[in-house]
Amino acid sequence: MRKIVLPGDLVSTNPRIAGPGTYVEGGKVYARVLGLLDKTDTGVRIIPLKGRYIPSVGDTVIGIVKEVTANGWIVDINSPYIAFLPVLENPAMRPNRKPNDVLDIGDAIIAKVMNIDPKMKVTLTMKDKLCRPIRVGRIVAINPTRVPRVIGKKGSMIKLLKTELDVQIIVGQNGLIWLNGDRRKVSIAEEAIYIIEQEAHTEGLTDRITEFVKRRKVELGLAKPEEVSKEEEVKGDG
Amino acid sequence: MGNEEIKLIVDGKRLDGRDFEELRPIKIEAGVLKRADGSCYLEMGKNKVVAAVYGPREVHPKHLEEPDRAIVRYRYSMAPFSVEDRKRPGPDRRSIEISKVSREALEPVIMKELFPRSAIDIFVEVLQADAGSRTACLNAASVALVDAGIPMKGIVTSVAVAKVDGVLVLDPMKEEDNYGEADIPFAFLIRNGKIESITLLQMDGRVTAEELRRALEMAKKGAMQIYQLQRDAIMRKYIKEEEVVE
Amino acid sequence: MPDDILVEIKKDYVLSKLRDGERIDGRKLDEVRPIEIQTGLIAKAEGSALVKLGNTMVVAGVKMQPGEPFPDAPDQGIIITNAELVPLASPTFEPGPPDENAIELARVVDRGIRHSEAVDLSKLCIEEGEKVWVIFIDIWALDDDGNLMDASALAAIAALLNTTVPAERFEVGDDFPLPVRDLPVAITSLVFEDKILVDPCLDELSIGKNTITITTDQNDNVVSIQKSGPFLLSESVFDRLIDVSIEKAREVRELLRDV
């Protein structure tokens, strides 16, 4: 397991390789947040274990409309910073339509962070193929720092869930995840996501999640036990 | 202060049997509250305190926000049932002063510039009070801040030194605080296992300059022990007993 | 507190002079501003003092009345210290109950007087367990040009030196001068990096409201310390501060002896 570090722990004496989650003082590199140490010869960074979501340009986020104005929508993206979606950035807007006919208070959307100004005013856009208003499916909320683990290295974890469960999954960087598909499969996906959230910092997680999903499919009558044990035989010691 | 009738040091030991440089028993647990972004329950002797951190979050009221940094707020509060004679709820002058100096002990360690226009709110409630509740609260707040994932230069650790019957003692308990000659609470920024600087310093009572310097040395040693317990409390949330890391 | 726009502008000037080891008013780093103490100016008070510390001005008034003693000190008088940073003293002070700064100031001044045992509280018993003298020290800021703390502490002890116990008014005996047996003096210094500026003026505080107040008694014992402001204090600066504060307090104390 990666080493857990606390703020103030010395992580390197080479300031040139200092990366996210660290700070440099007096020629030394220290951790500045609670997290997992990821250190190589070329870079040292801390993968945070906790923290609120701070938006970055390009992030996919799921948000809830809080207010409707003539110019657009004020959207809660589960961050200390509120976001704004201008009318021009919502492809569903037409000249003859009013903003609250397109999106109203309480509506959920999948959007992208288009711009952040120096005072942290966040502007969203929905002009991207992933973006849409959410009218079906479920939204699950997890600790935003665990999102990378839900996605997995090169998307491996999210791919695993999609193929095993045949559900649509869109992961917001802000810790909100949209799931859509068969109700029971979505429920297994949700359970799996919570396990990933809890155990994000441990090893062997992908295997454990694979096992968990297969087991739950059998328990909920979505798969036959033989299919599962045949694969386990092939795998050998799990 | 200074009551000749009560002997606070008997046969070279303190009333509760401790050595002069011995801390009271300490228990620390991180992440105990669900709603808060970070939290900590801490016992130090008979003190029982809970700390919660919310943030960074939107500032209310909005006119308090700073365009280029987070504001840090700290509220020290004592529950009415925490002391012998019921304490009326609501901030009194002592709580307001403690809140101020405690905030000032944590603020220079928190990287506020990373979160413009936001607030980092720290709330600490004393559920049961004995001497040194402000140091217990600071230790809990420090753990709660780490638990919340707030970026900081290091960890803040707090402990007090008192002078009783002419002798300096570490981490005074109630009788020593009430009848002693001086009470000196300290807090330190600890980084890379070393004391970096002093972040809280007050003195109530009467000491010589030489005693003051000795008290500082004693406090530093005590703080290093508490720091280790703060670390352990946070690590315990993520490491199961079977897994050994280095 | 709303920002005082003029003070922000002075910040760069203070810092540039400081880099050369100088202060904007020409003082040495450890030099206290000129002090003026006037006593007995408030006729209706039992004791009073006006202190000018440079341009900072503070009035302290002492009122006394009989009251019930605390149950655990049935034969001891009581001291209650309060401070008001009234709006007329600064464009940044707002009307209302004492804020954290006023509370801190009052409590630190109180600790200096209490722990130096400047007033022998056992001499203020009227009837044990029933009636003792209660001393109200009220500090009123009049002009804030920095370091209200030291000015207030000085005004408080000067007012006490000037106080007559109003026994006749309350028909409990003859009036007598309040017995004051120590002269606590507070010395506040601004800390900036490794530099110590004793008795900072308001413009100097624009570089950061980061101060340490050390109060000593006439035997050079330390009777109160307060670090005020969100800053990291290095041990070496603290070590120097102890000696500087004791030395400066001795100088200021000489002025009290004339009161």
Image (tube, coloured by chain):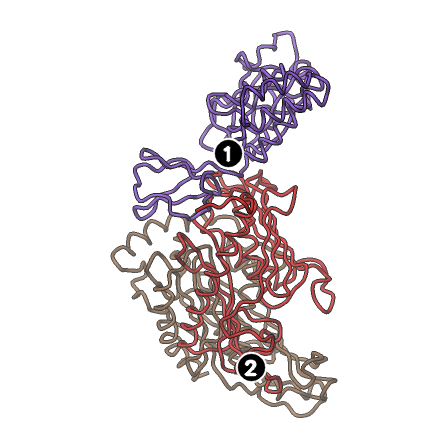
Q: Secondary structure at mark 2?
A: strand
What's the mark number on residue C70? none
User: For the residue marked with disc 2, what is the amino acid?
Assistant: Ile
Percent x, y of residue B75: 60, 53
Identify the residue at horizontal 65%, vertical 64% (top origin). Answer: B129
Decide: is B222 above or below C155. above
Q: Colour of chain A?
A: purple
Which residue position holds label 2? B9
User: For the residue marked with disc 1, what is the amino acid?
Assistant: Glu
Which is closer to the viewer, label 1 or label 2?
A: 1
The residue nearer to you, when weighing B10 against C249, is B10
Q: Which chain, by letter, is red?
A: B
Q: How dense is the environment of label 1, judged by Cα within 10 Å: few (below 14), some, or many (20 and up)? A: few
Q: Secondary structure at mark 1?
A: loop
Percent x, y of residue B226: 50, 60
Identify the residue at horizontal 31%, vertical 44% (top origin). Answer: A13
Q: Colour of chain C?
A: brown
The residue nearer to you, when weighing A210 against C71, is A210
Q: CA distance from mark 1 to mark 2?
A: 53 Å
